[in-house]
Image (tube, helix red, strand yellow):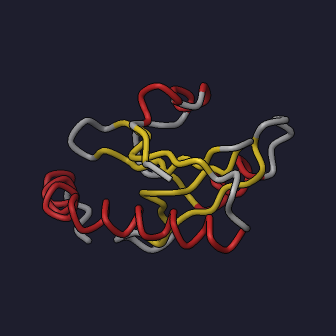
Amino acid sequence: MADDSGSETTPSFLSSLPDQPITDDIVKQIGESNHPKIHGAMGFPGSTPGTTEAFLLNMDGVTHVLVFDSPAERWRVYKSFDNTDMDHQQMIDHATEIANDWFAESLADRIGSAEDDGSGL
């Protein structure tokens, strides 16, 4: 099971997300949408309570881990993976590992962005 770059599989709604982290309610709305290919969404706790900087989007055959790119002020697909041979918990566990990797890699950028806008962490 190889991780793929998200560029070839970018969900079409990505451009409709705001240019800032979103709330848990928005993630819930995405997961509960009537889109036939979306099976659910789950946010990962971020550095600010009540805000989501990364979430998984479970779709037909693929799960995307979407992250908020603070320096670019946009959402992007961090990694995508084939979920056809995974049960629900395996998919969540794998997406959580990927999100944790992103949180660790992006810590300096997220701290810098929070300091720049005065919000702190």
Quarter holding residue 56: bottom right
What residue is at 13 percent from the left and 57 percent from the top? 112
On-image quarter of the C terminus: bottom left
In this rendering, the answer to whether 116 lies above or below 95 is above
In this rendering, the answer to whether 120 lies above or below 114 is below
Q: Which of 61 and 19 is in front in this view?
A: 61
In this rendering, the answer to whether 72 lies above or below 104 is above
What residue is at 80 percent from the left and 51 percent from the top? 32
In this rendering, the answer to whether 23 lies above or below 34 is below
* Image x and y of residue 59, in percent: 70, 44
* Image x and y of residue 21, in percent: 43, 51
Judge left or right: residue 75 versus residue 31. Answer: left
Quarter holding residue 118: bottom left
Q: Which of 31 and 9 is in front in this view?
A: 9
Q: Nearer the viewer, residue 120 or 54?
A: 54
Q: Nearer the viewer, residue 44 or 85?
A: 85
* Image x and y of residue 37, in percent: 78, 37
What residue is at 53 percent from the left and 48 percent from the top? 81
What residue is at 62 percent from the left and 71 percent from the top? 90
Q: Could you tell me how many numbered marks the image carries?
A: 0
* Image x and y of residue 18, in percent: 49, 37
